[in-house]
Image (cartoon, helix red, strand yellow):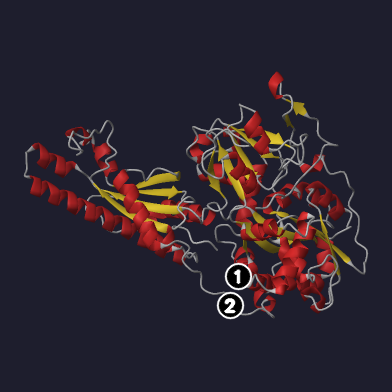
Amino acid sequence: MPVFRFIISLSCFAVLLALASPGLAQMTYVPSPPLSSVVSAAPKGCVAESEIQVPLIAWGGDIVTIHANGDNRKTQPGSVFASHNLKLSLFREDNFAKQVEAYLECKTPFLRGTMGMINMAADVTEADARTKMVVIYKMTDSAGGDALVVKPGIKSPRDLKGKTIALQRYGPHVDYLTTVLDSVGLKTGDVNIKWVEDLIELDDSSNSPAKALREDSSVDAAFVIIPDALALTSEGKVGTGSEDSVKGATILLSTKTADRVIMDVYAVRSDYFRANKAQVMAFVQGLLQADEKVKELFKKNKSSGFSSMIAAAAEILLDSKGAVADTEAMYGDARHSGFSGNASFFGSPEKPRSFEDVSSKIQAAFIPLNLMSSKKELAKADWDYPKMSAGLSGAAPAPAPRFDTKAVTRLVTEKQRKGSLAEGELYSFEVYFKPNQNTFPVDIYKESFDKVIELVSVYGGALLTIEGHSDPSNYLRQKVKNETPMVLNQIKQSARNLSYARANALKDSLVDYAKGKGVTLDSSQFGVVGHGIMAPNTPNCAFDSAGDISKSCYPASKEQWEQLRRVVFRLIQVEAEADIFKPL
């Protein structure tokens, strides 16, 4: 698994805030002011250079950039970039503040970071017309490399309210936190954030989120990279308290579930873009072509080409040719965007998780955190994507179902039998329908449909159950009249069938509505359930000694009666169910 990602050390700036508790003196927290308070470099104009400096970070997406350069820091003859008449010098800079300074001074015209990080830099970059950013390329989405680890008592993101969370300042997890909170209707003001300087522990002086979770009893949760998450939870199970684990700690969700949150991109200075648009376009085309080549090499990972590629990437990204396993894992922890991912991200502003949508949501969350002073409209390259497809293998294959539908059915059926569908719940909400209603008009359910589309757009690795519930009133009236078991069972079965049919009809209406908006939903991500009358939401509803609903479940008011007929949308984390989710 990868060990490095955005290691930011700004100790020369920080006014360190040590904990007051005597036993916790070694754990140190820092403030997190806007980057404009941290970066002091003055903007400079760009001058023509024979070799262009291009930044990398230690992340799987950067393997593609290295391969495009001929598996070398310097552009090699015969490489993809050389075929585009580019002459580049790649350098790794995991300190984002230093990257921003180099960008301002045009030591490099490029900026490499996550969408969250480049938005954090906007106060600095957008203050000068020359350094305004143009975002040109989306590399990856994190799809397993990052995680939220929690202590006992936190079962869903809603439980984070009022809790203390350890988070690296200016790092890749800030918009991970804000996105998770926003999904359940929470704001950053609803939690207490303790900022730390480091992402990982390099030595005893490091202060990371994982260390905070272990050593500070007031910290309830931490955003960490996956190797730290596995250590804190005793290899992804439940922390035992031994070695580097925290007793009772679990992974609430990783980016395997929240797989459309952390997005890595390249941006370029606007003055450089205007003066060298053809060159920047060639850079992006080279990345798109190399992305296809690297995917093929990973499919044939016994080839000599693969060995030389991965060894070079290991040396450049992790400082060791021997770190092949970690480098391979970094590649696997990302979903690589390629041509179709870029065309969709930049070319469909109306869709959820588009460039505009992501930037808007990040900035709305960062301003209250004092990480940005005001909203900034970031520019994008607006490439002619049909033209950009030149040299690529062809159209991307149609998206394959990401869940095993048979395994989903088995899991949902078993959870329904055990009454455990709420286990692993990330978020849920209800919609209601009238007696004898069998259709679900968009004008009535639009708000709910939009919420579902937003959730599955963020949590592409979660299972969404659509659970139908029927009104038990008639059954309970017949039961009080001592109707025969055969008749009662017929009423139960009829209600179960009807609730399933309604849930399925609602799913179909949702899919059709999304399609009308140009959004294709993966139906394999949905599990449809018909509870019938056996899970009423009547207050104080109790079951009798035979396990059947009792007359206490009968509605006491019209309002209670109307709320019995409902469908529950429930987003469930299923990372532990290996046969459910299909790896990329």
* Disc 2/disc 1 C-alpha distance (Å): 8 Å
Q: Give the quadrant of residue 309.
A: bottom right
Query: Is disc 2 in contact with disc 1, using a CB cutoff of under 8 Å?
Result: yes
Relative to 265, is 554 above or below? Answer: above
Q: In percent of the image, x 22 and y 33: which residue is there?
A: 556
Which residue is labeled 2 in the image?
395
Q: On the picture, is 353 further left or further right than 438?
A: right
Sequence-first tag of 2 and 1: 1
Q: Is residue 73 visible?
A: yes
**Residue shown at 52% from the left, 45% from the top:** 183
The answer to which image quadrant residue 14 occupies is top right
Residue 567 showing in the rendered view: no
Above or below: residue 229 compared with residue 345: above
- Residue 447 sits above or below residue 184 on the image: below
Looking at the image, which is closer to me, 413 or 481? 413
Is 280 situated left or right of 156 in this image?
right
The amino acid marked with disc number 1 is: Ser
- Helix, strand or loop under label 1: helix
Find residue 340 and name its label. Answer: 1
Residue positioned 18% across, 41% down in the render: 473
Label 1, residues with CA under 10 Å away: few <14, some 14-19, many ≥20:
some
Q: What residue is drawn where x is 69% and y is 68%? A: 382
In this rendering, position of residue 129 left or right of residue 382:
right
Residue 430 in picture, x, y percent from top left: 37, 46
Query: x and y percent of residue 399 in the render?
Result: 51, 69
Residue 579's spot in the image, x, y percent? Answer: 44, 58
